Each structure stands twice: as structure tokens, then as C-alpha cells.
Image (cartoon, rainbow, N blue to C red):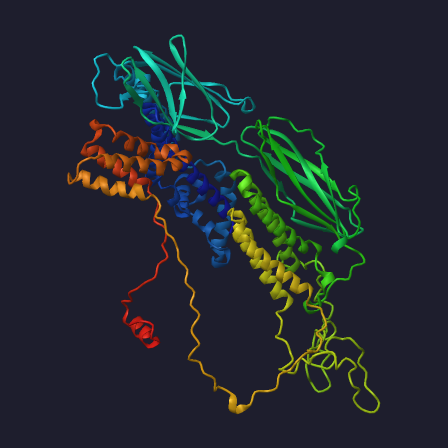
């Protein structure tokens, strides 16, 4: 269609201008909300809300080709009100219409590229800047005259103390006048120190946090309660100082004693640790498996991308060369440095490195396993990460390749299949080492084993030809060798077996191809191995038909999926049975090409017909397995506390000492969760703690604490139990017939 492309381009430019117009309105409104409230969340929310409203009003997606044609006909005289012909197929037009279509296309060709779609971008820009200026003015007025802070509350609002009991004192309560918190990040992060008065702290692992408190009044002792650990402050002149290295997330509070010995405690505050993540290593543009012929140029180009949250210290290539096969296999590991020097401290680098297999002294039949390892600058112990493992193989020029799956022997299996046994050994070692290593190291090693299992599975799949149906797997015979099949029919019209030249027959006397077949002169010659081989046609002596090789390989592949899954989920105990199953299948395949020897030993006499089915079965009972499960309901005290709070809300019960103990136990149950997510559980723990004070035992506080407990309570896990009642009539009838239900 002549000129249709130009109309589509004009339509897209029109739609894009409408989208930009809507974004300008949304940006202005979002900036206005942020400058007015000094809250980034409200600003983003206003931006999204305004964008939705603007797009709904402008509806840029509804600008159709008909709208474009109408606009062009109305504003471009060269169109001659015939631009709609450009959207119609030429073969559907008359000769006159074709002529008009060609004329309009020629005239609009230079015009449409310069024609501007209708828009109000200038108006949208004015509105955006106007809203931003209005937000600046409104924020300034509210801050100056409305006594609204800029998001950093005063010290007195941040840290407040309350007496631990309701005993009144004759002396005046000391007042916290100044709170200064200094955060010193580790030097390798290259982050500047931070000074704040906000007690809720979020910092990088290994940071040094220093609290400086200054009181007005007589204070005897100041301590920090960090999840049950009491840490005392040092008094330096008029300030109380405490320095702590951030090693874990949690929550804390301050306590102090006045001159009369009365205890005061602050609210709970969060201390959240940001973990230094290991580097992310990715290799781009390289297949997991690369195969070289002997005469090929055996070079690989390694394009590596490495990123880290704080900085990279070093990176290198770990290359392992495998020589030989079977029990004589040998491994040689080398560390290959990149030609380009690593810029220490950079958060992102791109590295290229050629790998020459000849330089690694690899011969035909050798295999190369390599990956990239990166180290960050974390101190004192750096994080180490690695990429996935890649493989390069030089095909062996003297190894016979298999032709048909039924003839695969033990020596034709890829050598890397045998590494499943090593995976089992490493998994068992990981399970044994779990009590002696950290949770982080355990998950890292389990994930690395998952990587290795994945590589084994991928090579398994490529061995079957899963990577590409059009690309034959290594060692696979092309199916184009015998194309002329019409000329090979038998003398009596029977279809020729295409596998006759490759597979042994299980339906004749020479099923294992151990001797040559030839016709004797005086009749049929007796098979010399008849006394040693079993006859597959004899149902009493034949074995069950084995699965085909491809089916067995598929079973192993599926099992490896499950083994990898549990390793990725940090469950090596559950992965180990699948690994054993995969190894068993591989061993069965290796042992498939064996000679079946005739059964020897004692053959019992046949049972007499009159003795069949005449035995006594009254003493035979069904197999019954019983196993007891001990079910411990999680968060039992927390759930009991919720029920107890409901009674307190309804004024059916009064607060007792048992309630104090119950709420304390509920806090202890939630404390481990609060260490991982302090912000989520902080209000809950603070509410339970406030109930210890008589002044806070009100209906409103009960409702707030109950609501917070319900919000963090996990779902109840399934409890396996025996059903004793069956309500369905069909089930009742079935069980009655079985005699198991009365």
C-alpha cells in the first residue's frame, strides 16, 4: 500500500505527543505533593494517580488511522481529501482510484514527515512548572508558620522515656535534651559518615554506630537493652556515649535511673543491617557446550559482566582440563588471569578474554570446564561469587560414535555422566558439615551444588539432542544416509527394517550377534551358544523388556530436575535420594550391553493341580503401619494472647499477673522474627511491652495490640490427622461394604 507507512508514522508521533503531555501533567502534580508533604511515598503516589487520570482523559491509544486521515485531509491541501486511499490495498481499487492513490502518495511523501501532530505540550509544561512553584511556596509557608518539620523530628519527639512503674517521685524527672547518632560505614564502601537524631537506624554490615545522649537533671546510670543484652554507656563530660559494631538486625531501647533509683525506659527502635551482597557474574554470548573438531581453531571468546553493590576487588578464570576416561581420568586446574587489569573498587566492569585450548595443552578427547570467579572488597572476609560452568570439548578422532540407541555400550557414555557420583559425595559432605558451618556458607555451597547439578542435566539433555531438534547431538548418526527406501522391499513385498544394519535381533537364535550367521549345507546348524543363552521368545526364561535408552535417559533427566530443585531450596537431604536414583539409571544404561546367561540352579517341581488354592488364609492379616506425629502449634502464646485480649476488650476479665507473663512469652516468640524484620514487628513488641504499665491498660490499647498481633501472625500449617467421621453417603456405603467402618 503506497504511503501507508507514512500515515502510520504520523499516527505514532501523535500518540507519543499525547503520552508526553500526560507525563508532564503527572510530574507537576507529583512534585507538588512531594514539596508540600516532604514525603517521597506520597510524591510517587501523586505522580501515578495523576498519570492515570491524564492518560484516561487524553486517551492516546484511541488515536486511530481514521483520525489521522481526517486530520491530514483537513490540514493538508495536497491530500485532496483522498488520503484514505493510501490505507486501501491497490488490487481492490479501480483504475481511476489507483491513479489518484499514486498521485496523493507522491504529493504527501515530502509533506507528512514535516507535519506536526496536534498537541498541547507548551501548556502542559507551564502547568508542570506552575505546580512545582506552588509546591515550593506551600512547603515553605507550612514549614515556617505551621510548625511542620522537614521530616527530621526533634530529639525530644524521637526518644521519649517513661517510668517502668507508676510510683510517683518527689524529684523532677530527668529530661533527654540531645540525641546525636553517628554512623561510620566501613572504609571499603566509600560512603561518607552520617550524623542523625533519628533512633531507627539502617546501615551496612560492619558499620560503627555511636550514640551520644545528653540529659538535663541528675542521671545515675544509662544502658542500652539490645534484645535482652544490657550494654552500659560511658559518661564523657556531660554526655553518655556508646559505640557498637553492626553485626545483626534487631531492636533496642534505652534505660536510665534517676537520683532516687527509679527506672525509666524508652520505646523500642529498630537497628536494621544491610547485607553486603556478593558480586554478580554473568558470561554473555557463549553456549554452555562448545565442541571442536581436531582441525578447528580451538579458541573461545569470553565476555564477562561483573557487578557489585560496593566494589570489585579481583576476578579471574578457573579452568579445569580433564584428560583420559574411566578410572584413569586426570584433572588439571589452572587459574587464568584476564589480560585487562581489574580496576579495584569499581561497581561494574566488562571483561573480554580469549581462551585458547591449544595453549592449555588439550588433546583430542579432552574436556575443559571453566567459570569466572569474582571477589569483592568486603572486610574482613570478602564475598566470593562465580558464574555458571561452561564446557569445551575436543572430539576424539579415534572414538567410535554410537549409531542406534539400542547398541549403546558402557564405553560410549560421556565421561561427565560419571560426575553424578561426585555430586553425591559432595552433597553428603555438605550434610555432615552443616552443624559446623554458618547458614550463609551452607546456602552458598548448596546453591553451588545446584549449579553443578544443572550443568550435568544440561549436558545430559544435549546428549539426547534437547538443545535443538535440527542439530544432532554429539555422536548421533544422520538420518540422511539411507534415503532411497523404495528400492529395498523384500521379495514378497514385506517392508525392510531400517534398523537391520545397526541393531541386534531379539527374535532369532543369534540375538546378540556373537557368531556369524551362515546356512549349513545339510540343514539348520545348531547355535553353539544355545546352552549358554536364554531364549527371549520363551516366556518362562525371557526377562522383562527393558526401557529404550532414550526413555531411560529421559527418566534420569527428570530426576535431575528434582535433585537440582531441592539443592536450590537449600534442602540437600531431600535432593540426595533423587541423586541416587539418577546414578542408578546411569549405571543401568552402562550395564545394558551385557550377555544374558542361561539360568542355573534349582528348579522346583511344578505344583499339583489338586493342591492349588487350597491353603488356609485365616491367619493372614493386612499390613498395618502406624506412626505417631507430634504436632507443636506455632506461636501458641501469641494466639492465646489474642484470645485473652478479646476478653479484656469486652470487659469480661481484668488484667492479672498471669496476663503479664503471657504477653511476655508472646514477645519472646516474636523476638526471633523481629531480628530478621525489625520494622515489621517493632510496633507489636512495643505494644506488648506497654501493657506492662498500668497507665496503658485501656480498651483502645488492647485493640491496637490485638490488631498488630493478628497482622504478623503466620498461617496455620496443615496438621495431619485421622478423620473419624465420614459424612458423604457414598463413602459410608463403600466403607460399610469393606467392613472398616461401623
Q: Is residue 474 placed above or below 52 in the rendered structure? A: below
x then y, percent, for residue 173: 26, 14
Report the quarter where the C terminus lies. Answer: bottom left
**Is residue 537 shown left or right of residue 248?**
right
**Residue 355 visible in rendering:** yes
The residue sitting at 43% across, 38% down in the picture is 16
x then y, percent, for residue 523: 80, 91
x then y, percent, for residue 369: 69, 46
**Residue 470 visible in rendering:** no
Q: Is residue 491 placed above or below 370 in the rendered structure? A: below
Front residue of 524 and 137: 524
Front residue of 44 and 196: 196
x then y, percent, for residue 12: 45, 42
State which quadrant residue 71 falls in: top left
**Is residue 729 shown left or right of residue 595?**
left
The residue sitting at 21% across, 41% down in the picture is 646
* Residue that lies at the very extreme toward the left in this rendered image: 651
**Is residue 366 shown left or right of residue 681?**
right
* Residue that lies at the very extreme toward the top in this rendered image: 237
Total marks in image: 0
The residue sitting at 23% across, 34% down in the picture is 657
State which quadrant residue 480 falls in: bottom right
The residue sitting at 78% across, 75% down in the picture is 514
* Residue that lies at the very extreme toward the front in this rendered image: 619
Amino acid at each position: 500500500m503506497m504511503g501507508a507507512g507514512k500515515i502510520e508514522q504520523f499516527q505514532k508521533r501523535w500518540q507519543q505527543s499525547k503520552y508526553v503531555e500526560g507525563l508532564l501533567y503527572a510530574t507537576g502534580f507529583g512534585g507538588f505533593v512531594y514539596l508540600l508533604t516532604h514525603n517521597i511515598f506520597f510524591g510517587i503516589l501523586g505522580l501515578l494517580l495523576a498519570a492515570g487520570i491524564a492518560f484516561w482523559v487524553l486517551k492516546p491509544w484511541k488515536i486511530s488511522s481514521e483520525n489521522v486521515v481526517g486530520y491530514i485531509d483537513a490540514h493538508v491541501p495536497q491530500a485532496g481529501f483522498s488520503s484514505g486511499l493510501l490505507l486501501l490495498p491497490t488490487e481492490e481499487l479501480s483504475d481511476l482510484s489507483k491513479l489518484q492513490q499514486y498521485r496523493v502518495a507522491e504529493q504527501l511523501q515530502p509533506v507528512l514527515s514535516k507535519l506536526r501532530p496536534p498537541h498541547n505540550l507548551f501548556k502542559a509544561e507551564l502547568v508542570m512548572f506552575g505546580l512545582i512553584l506552588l509546591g515550593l511556596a506551600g512547603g515553605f509557608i507550612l514549614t515556617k508558620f505551621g510548625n511542620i518539620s522537614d521530616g527530621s523530628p526533634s530529639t525530644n519527639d524521637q526518644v521519649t522515656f517513661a517510668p517502668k512503674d507508676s510510683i510517683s517521685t518527689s524529684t523532677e524527672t530527668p529530661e533527654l535534651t540531645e540525641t546525636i547518632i553517628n554512623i561510620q560505614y566501613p572504609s571499603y564502601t566509600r560512603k561518607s559518615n552520617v550524623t542523625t537524631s533519628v533512633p531507627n537506624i539502617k546501615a551496612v554490615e560492619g558499620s560503627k554506630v555511636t550514640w551520644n545522649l545528653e540529659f538535663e537533671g541528675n542521671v545515675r546510670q544509662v544502658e542500652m537493652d539490645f534484645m535482652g543484652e544490657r550494654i552500659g554507656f560511658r559518661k564523657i563530660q556531660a554526655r553518655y556515649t556508646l559505640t557498637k559494631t553492626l553485626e545483626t538486625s534487631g531492636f533496642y531501647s534505652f534505660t536510665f535511673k534517676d537520683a532516687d533509683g527509679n527506672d525509666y525506659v524508652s520505646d523500642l527502635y529498630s537497628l536494621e543491617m544491610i547485607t553486603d551482597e556478593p558480586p554478580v557474574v554473568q558470561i554473555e554470548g557463549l553456549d554452555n557446550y562448545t565442541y571442536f573438531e581436531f582441525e578447528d581453531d580451538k579458541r573461545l571468546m569470553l565476555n564477562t559482566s561483573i557487578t557489585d553493590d560496593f566494589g570489585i576487588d579481583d576476578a579471574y578464570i578457573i579452568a579445569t582440563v580433564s584428560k583420559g576416561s574411566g578410572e584413569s581420568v586426570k584433572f588439571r586446574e589452572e587459574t587464568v588471569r584476564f589480560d585487562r587489569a581489574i580496576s579495584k573498587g569499581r561497581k561494574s566492569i566488562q571483561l573480554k578474554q580469549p581462551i585458547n585450548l591449544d595453549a592449555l595443552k588439550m588433546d583430542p578427547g579432552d574436556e575443559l570446564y571453566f567459570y569466572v570467579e569474582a571477589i569483592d572488597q568486603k572486610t574482613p572476609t570478602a564475598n566470593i561469587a562465580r558464574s555458571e560452568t561452561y564446557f569445551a570439548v575436543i572430539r576424539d578422532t579415534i572414538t567410535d560414535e554410537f549409531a542406534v540407541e539400542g547398541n549403546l555400550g558402557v564405553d560410549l557414555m560421556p565421561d561427565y555422566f560419571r560426575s553424578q557420583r561426585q555430586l553425591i559425595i559432595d552433597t553428603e559432605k555438605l550434610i555432615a558439615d552443616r552443624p559446623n558451618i554458618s547458614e550463609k556458607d551452607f546456602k552458598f555451597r548448596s546453591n553451588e551444588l545446584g549449579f553443578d547439578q544443572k550443568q550435568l542435566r544440561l549436558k545430559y539433555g544435549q546428549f539426547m539432542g534437547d538443545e535443538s531438534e535440527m542439530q544432532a547431538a554429539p555422536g548421533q548418526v544422520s538420518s540422511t544416509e539411507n534415503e532411497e527406501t523404495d528400492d529395498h522391499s523384500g521379495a514378497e513385498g514385506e517392508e525392510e527394517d531400517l534398523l537391520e544394519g545397526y541393531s541386534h535381533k531379539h527374535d532369532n537364535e543369534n540375538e546378540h550377534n556373537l557368531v556369524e550367521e551362515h546356512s549349513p549345507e545339510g540343514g539348520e546348524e545348531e547355535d553353539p551358544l544355545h546352552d549358554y543363552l536364554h531364549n527371549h521368545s520363551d516366556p518362562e526364561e525371557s526377562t522383562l523388556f527393558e526401557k529404550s535408552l532414550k526413555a531411560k535417559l529421559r527418566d534420569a533427566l527428570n530426576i535431575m530436575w528434582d535433585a537440582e530443585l531441592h539443592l536450590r531450596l537449600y534442602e540437600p537431604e531431600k535432593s540426595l535420594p533423587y541423586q541416587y536414583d539418577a546414578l542408578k539409571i546411569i549405571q543401568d544404561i552402562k550395564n545394558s550391553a551385557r550377555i544374558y546367561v542361561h539360568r542355573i540352579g534349582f528348579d522346583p517341581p511344578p505344583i499339583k493341580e489338586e493342591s492349588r488354592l487350597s491353603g488356609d488364609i485365616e491367619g493372614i492379616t493386612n499390613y498395618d503401619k502406624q506412626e505417631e506425629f507430634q504436632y507443636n502449634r506455632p506461636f501458641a502464646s501469641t494466639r492465646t494472647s489474642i484470645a485473652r485480649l478479646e476478653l479484656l476488650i469486652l470487659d469480661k476479665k481484668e488484667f492479672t499477673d498471669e496476663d503479664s507473663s503471657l504477653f511476655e512469652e508472646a514477645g519472646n516468640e516474636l523476638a526471633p522474627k523481629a531480628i530478621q524484620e525489625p520494622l515489621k514487628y517493632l510496633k507489636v513488641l512495643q505494644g506488648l511491652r506497654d501493657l506492662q504499665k498500668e497507665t496503658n491498660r485501656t480498651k483502645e490499647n488492647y485493640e491496637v495490640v490485638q490488631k498488630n498481633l493478628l497482622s504478623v501472625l503466620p498461617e496455620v500449617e496443615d496438621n495431619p490427622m485421622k478423620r473419624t467421621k465420614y459424612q458423604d453417603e457414598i463413602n459410608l456405603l463403600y466403607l460399610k461394604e469393606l467392613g472398616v467402618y461401623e
